[in-house]
Structures are given as C-alpha cells and as structure tokens.
Amino acid sequence: MQRTTRGVPAFVILVSFLLGPASVLAADPSATVAAADAAWARRAAGATGGTAADAAARDVVAAARAAVAAEPESVGARWRLMRALYFLGEHATPGEAAKKAVFDEGKRVGEETLALLRRTAGASAGRDLTSASPVELAPYLAQTPDAVPAFLWAGVNWGKWALVFGKTAAARQGAAAKIRDYAAAVVALDPTWDEGGGYRVLGRLHHQTPSIPFVTGWASRAEALASLRRAVEKGPRNFVNRLYLAEAIWDYEKGKRDEARGMLEALVREAPTPGLEVEAARAQEDARALLAAWAGKGRR
C-alpha cells in the first residue's frame, strides 16, 4: 500500500543521512518534507523480511514529525506523518499496547488533517463545510494534490486503529463508515493513486466488516470483490491488491478457490517492485500463511 517519492534533492539526502532526519534545516518547510521523503526511501534498511528495523522506522516518523512541526498546516507534511506511523505500527511495532499508541496518533493526525481540508474546500465552495464528509469535500479538492494521499492514509490508520482497539470501540466511533468515506473520496479524486489504493482499502473494508443492521448494513460481499478486482486492474503488480483479492475470492467464491490459490502461489514466487521490499515481503509472508491454512481444501 506504499508509494516511494522520487525527486528528493541529493544534498537533503546526504545531510539527513549524516545528521539524522530531525536535524535537517527545520526552519525550511520544503527541506523538512524532502528530508521526510529521504527517510522514507531508507525505510527498508536493516529489515528482516516484512519486519522493519525499529531504528529505520522511527527515523521515518521523526522526520515526518519534524516536517509537521515546521509547517503545522501543511497537508503534505501530515500525510507523510500518517504514512510513517502506519509503517512503524504495521512493520516495526510488536505488542498490542504499543500498536494502539501508534495508530491512535495516526487516527488523530488524520482527523486534524480532515479539518484542514474542510477549511480548504470551504474556501473553494464559498460556504461552511466544517462537518462535511471526505466524499462531500472531494469535488472542491480536485486541485489540492495532497488531498488524495491524506484521505488514503487517514483511512488506513483508522483501519489499523479499529483492528487493535477492537470491534466495540470501532463501532462506537463509527470507524467503518469513516474508512469507507475516506476510501471513496480517494476513488472519486484519483482511482489510480497508489496502484488502486482507494479501491484496495474499500474492498478490504467490505470484506472484513460484518454487516450489522443500522450500523454497517452497507457492507457487501459483491462490493468487496468488485473493488478488489478494480484495485488489481489499477495495480496488477501490487502484492497487497492481489493478496486481498485472493482472500476474498477464497471466502466468497467457493468455485474459484483454485484460482485464489494460484494467485497466491504466483505472488510468493515473484520478486518485489524496487522500493517496496518490506511491504512485499509482509504480503508474501501472509500469502504463505494462507496457503498453509488452505492446504488440502477447496480443490474441485
């Protein structure tokens, strides 16, 4: 689910490597964002498969926090912090309590960023949008390039928050609807972003969310499959797209279980896209675990 940012000035990469991400030209917002991108590009250093090195993951977060501190109202700095927190929580944080702290921060940053985007959209619309949903904001943010990754990473952090805090807390805060609206806004603004990232989040949400009347009655098997197929169309090489689609096919289309198995067998044989080594390794680890669980089942 990750995107590597290119075009980072060479001098910023060199200085951030030598001095550490939080030390780089903190008074210059553009430089701190570039330093955050440089730290992100180094996030696989010292990783073991799908588990990132703690130091590398924390450097990414420190650099993104420095960017937000330099320019608190920068949506670009904020989505980088949400992305960094996701990476830290998903790939370098063991233990439920520690994960809760990371994803709680990610959720909070996402809601603060939504408030900034509501202000931007309201100025464009010429009216008050302080309670508008991400989907309602989307038409007024088409010329705000940082809106798409901000919505995507806010939805991802909400999703991880819901997983670690549990169904009761998630239902109480309306997590499923929030994730749905963030993902739908990404699809509305740029369905190709992050290799179909909006469809990936939306499809996974429909797959993993139980249909509860008056709460999540909109959750749909058909929507899960349709959205994940669209994600694979937009990003056919993306390992997570294919992992999620295979899992949904296995669960919902019993006659196609051999297809699901074949998708994962192909996935574990492939070399990852450069720059996505940690994320791809985790997807392959998950795929191997599913194949082991599926062994001897579903053959027709």
Image (spheres, rainbow, N blue to C red):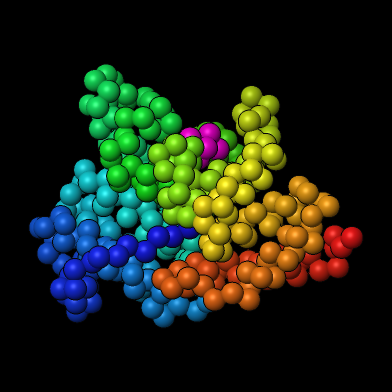
Residue appearing at x 66%, y 70% in the figure: 266
The image position of residue 153, as x and y in percent, is: 41, 49
* Residue found 76% across the figure and 47% down from its top: 252
Q: Quadrant of the C terminus?
A: bottom right
Q: Main secondary structure of the magenta part?
A: helix
Residue 171: x and y in percent read: 57, 35
Q: What are the residue bounds of the magenta stretch?
A: 176-182
Q: Is residue 163 above or below residue 60?
A: above
- Residue 91 is at least partly visible in this image: yes
- Is 99 included in the stretch rendered in magenta? no
Q: Is residue 65 left or right of residue 168?
A: left
Vertical side of 104 occupied by 279: above or below: below
Q: Is residue 1 above or below residue 214?
A: below
Closer-to-camera residue (155/6) = 6
Q: How many discs mark residues in the rendered view?
A: 0
| Percent position of residue 221, x then y | 70, 40
Q: Is residue 163 or residue 78 the one in the foreground?
A: 78
| For residue 12, above or below residue 211 | below
Residue 131 in the image: x percent, y percent? 37, 24
In the image: residue 153, left or right of residue 122? right
Residue at the extreme top of the image, as rendered? 127
Q: Is residue 178 magenta?
A: yes
Location of residue 219 by image quarter: top right
Residue at position x 64%, y 39% in the image: 223
